[in-house]
Amino acid sequence: MKQTADAIIIGTGVIGAAIAFELSRLGYRTLSLDRNTQAGHGSTAGSCACIRMHYSTFDGTALAWEGYHYWRDWAEYLNAKSDSQLSRFVETGCLVMKTKQNGYLEKHVQYSTALNCPFEQWSAEEIVKRMPIYDLQSFAPARKPDDALFCQPNGGRLSGGVYWPNAGYVTDPALSAQNLCDAATRAGARFRMGAEIVGILMDSGKVSGVRLASGESLSAPVVINVAGPASSRINAMAGVLDDMTITTRALRQEVVHVPAPEGFNFEKDGMMVSDSDIALYCRPEHGNHILIGSEDPECDTHDWVDDDQKYNREFTDQWTTQAMRFGQRVPSLGIPQTSRGIVDLYDASTDWIPIYDKSCLPGFYMACGTSGNQYKNAPIAGKMMAALIDYCESGNDQDMTPLQFELPYTGQHVSTGFYSRKRPINTESSFSVVG
Ligand SMILES: Cc1cc2nc3c(=O)[nH]c(=O)nc-3n(C[C@H](O)[C@H](O)[C@H](O)COP(=O)(O)OP(=O)(O)OC[C@H]3O[C@@H](n4cnc5c(N)ncnc54)[C@H](O)[C@@H]3O)c2cc1C
């Protein structure tokens, strides 16, 4: 077999595309493959694309704060021409309610302070001044509609929150993946769409390429699994699951879009809000809508999916439950008869922290388990993966001596071992989309 590329990248979502860009910049001849016909049309297209800084671990916060800068400087990062059609970052800020569930944000504030990531303490009065549609009665814990206490206040009130002014969202996540592919192409990367991988090829104990559904084989000494919710299937094809302590699994999610209450311009005056008291996050959506996602409360059953191409794409009662939970906080909210929003899949990892790592098969790498919270990190994850691959391909032992990586904007040093497939389950995690 003739060598097709230095590295084959499976997937052209936002993270796969970022890896293609960054590896090409390092001089690797990359070939990206995707079964879809357009880049970014896997789970990236369904992403809420929230860019926020509060994470439950120091490393998670450091990566997210670093990640923000790429969205802020998007055109410059891509080295894009001035007439390019680019996705847009809208810097709304993110308010996070202080709750018992998040330890009243004590560690989040500590991490942001250590990282020089700006934040403001907001009193309950300040929150209502900024968001007059908000009612700060407490409703925790989140309940199911068949619970007699569903939507009943518990007698307490929220005392305040922390506002991260640099947070926001990206307007068109699929376009952002396309922007990365265009940048990668300019750096020499190649892309082939409509190519489904059905097998991982091996030779002399190393990865040697991929087999496509068409029967064609493509060879490369490096193959990278960035298949999103299909990651565990690809890892199974490569036979690399056995030495992993952290595994990945596709998890179905519903995201609600509802019109903002009359008289409040949520698109202009609203912001991203993470509210663990009602187990939801929200952000402005175009057309003065509010996008509402779940923060995965314990009472909701996880809807695991075995086949990431065959799952229920229709809304269920979960849509109404999320809309009603949001109505607890915004009593003037009208809930339309027709459900609008998104149904898509997370690639959830055991501890809701991603895997950015090598595998036990030499030459086979993975960037997966992104758990509904890694869109924001795509550019820096791309950079870190490219550095990690180069480190391993240069003969270093990532498992024994993980690459120490400097985050270019913030100057912070992180150990890539934090994202190891073999790490112990990280008990600092929120075990939810919050990461
Ligand atoms: C509903 C939802 C909301 C989210 N909200 C946020 C958010 O607000 N903020 C945030 O930071 N993150 C968020 N995320 C997470 C974020 O969107 C993902 O982490 C990110 O998009 C993953 O990108 P990716 O490139 O790894 O995977 P994907 O975008 O899923 O791309 C994987 C690609 O691999 C291809 N593929 C799979 N199998 C094969 C095969 N056998 N052969 C060929 N190609 C294959 C697929 O076609 C797909 O294009 C959200 C995710 C979802 C689903």
Image: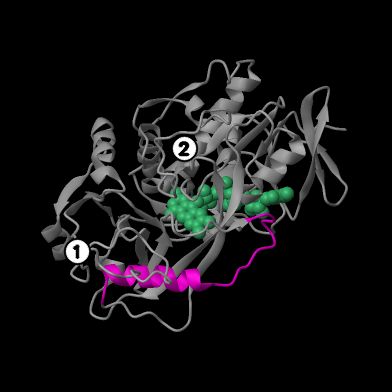
Residue at (54% x, 41% y) in the render? 350
Residue 241 image offset from top left, x and y in percent: 68, 34
411 to 280, vertically: above or below: above
Q: Horizontally, is 236 left or right of 389 in the view?
A: right
| Residue under pointer 1 | 155
Q: Quadrant of the N terminus?
A: top right
Q: What is the crowding at mark 2: few (fewer than 14 residues within 10 Å), some, or many (at least 20)?
A: many
Is ligand 1 less than 8 Å from the beta carbon at label 2? no
Residue 247 image offset from top left, x and y in percent: 60, 39
Q: Horizontally, is 131 left or right of 83 in the view?
A: left
Residue 415 image offset from top left, x and y in percent: 45, 24
Q: Nearer the viewer, residue 374 or 16?
A: 374
Q: Nearer the viewer, residue 183 or 420?
A: 420
Q: Which mark is residue 380?
A: 2
- Mark 2, secondary structure of its residue: helix
Q: Closer to the camera: disc 1 or disc 2?
A: 1
Q: Is residue 309 magenta?
A: yes
Q: Which quarter of the figure has residue 321? A: bottom left
Part of the protein shown in magenta: 305-331
Q: Horizontally, is 60 left or right of 392 in the view?
A: left
Can you see residue 175? no
**Amino acid type shown at disc 1:** Gly
